Amino acid sequence: MVKNIGLGTGRRKTSVARVYIREGSGKMTVNGKTVEEYFNTIAQVITVRKPLMVIGCENKYDILINVYGGGLSGQAGACLHGLSRALTQVDEGNRSTLKANGFLTRDARMVERKKYGRRGARRRFQFSKR
């Protein structure tokens, strides 16, 4: 039986990521695939791995991530947030480092809702004088 030593929930835009940390060799799985297979760009892969790089424990834990909702960019941000939360649960000493880098702050920016009488959230229909 594999025991989770830390778990965290991360959110970004409409994406939600559940992150489970286990003792291991540094293997990271996102929805049953490796991080490189799941995320398209190198920037997204780096975003997900940032908390581990900052703390300096890339090969210490196995990480399992379940993520859903939104697009890949939002999902990468949700993974970063969830992983940071899980790492603080593993060792409270990590908290100050992660907080200084802004990884524990939930990014509240979301898409503004469409209003009635408008083409989008703020876009108006073309004005005709005559």
Image (cartoon, rainbow, N blue to C red):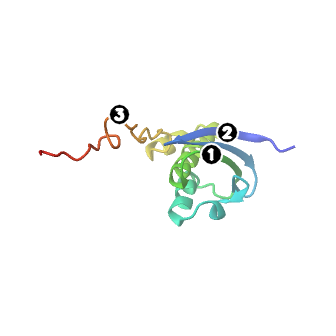
Front residue of 33/56: it is 33
Residue tagged 3: 116
Report the amino acid beneath label 2. Answer: Leu
Quarter-wise, where is residue 9 in the image?
A: top right
Q: Is residue 83 visible?
A: yes
CA–CA distance in space, label 1 to label 3: 29 Å
Task: Give the secondary structure at mark 2.
Answer: strand
Quadrant of res 32 = bottom right
Q: Position of residue 19 (x, y in %)?
A: 66, 44
| In the rendered image, the vertical position of residue 123 relative to residue 30, given as above or below | above
Residue found at x 64% / y 60%: 38
Quadrant showing the C terminus: top left
For marks 2 and 3 on the same chain, the one whose residue lies earlier in the sequence = 2
Q: What element does badge 1 sit on? A: strand
Between circles 2 and 3, the one closer to the viewer is 3
Residue at image coords 35%, 33%: 116
Q: Earlier in the sequence, mark 1 or mark 3?
A: 1
Q: CA distance from mark 1 to mark 2?
A: 16 Å
Type of residue at label 1? Tyr
**Location of the N terminus (image quadrant):** top right
The residue indicated by pointer 2 is 7
Residue count near mark 1 (Cα–Cα under 10 Å), binned few <14, some 14–19, many ≥20: some
Q: Residues within 10 Å of mark 2 (few under 14, many from 20)?
A: many
Question: Which of 84 and 122 lies nearest the eye of the viewer?
Answer: 122
> Can you give x and y, in whole percent of width and height, for residue 47 in the image?
52, 56
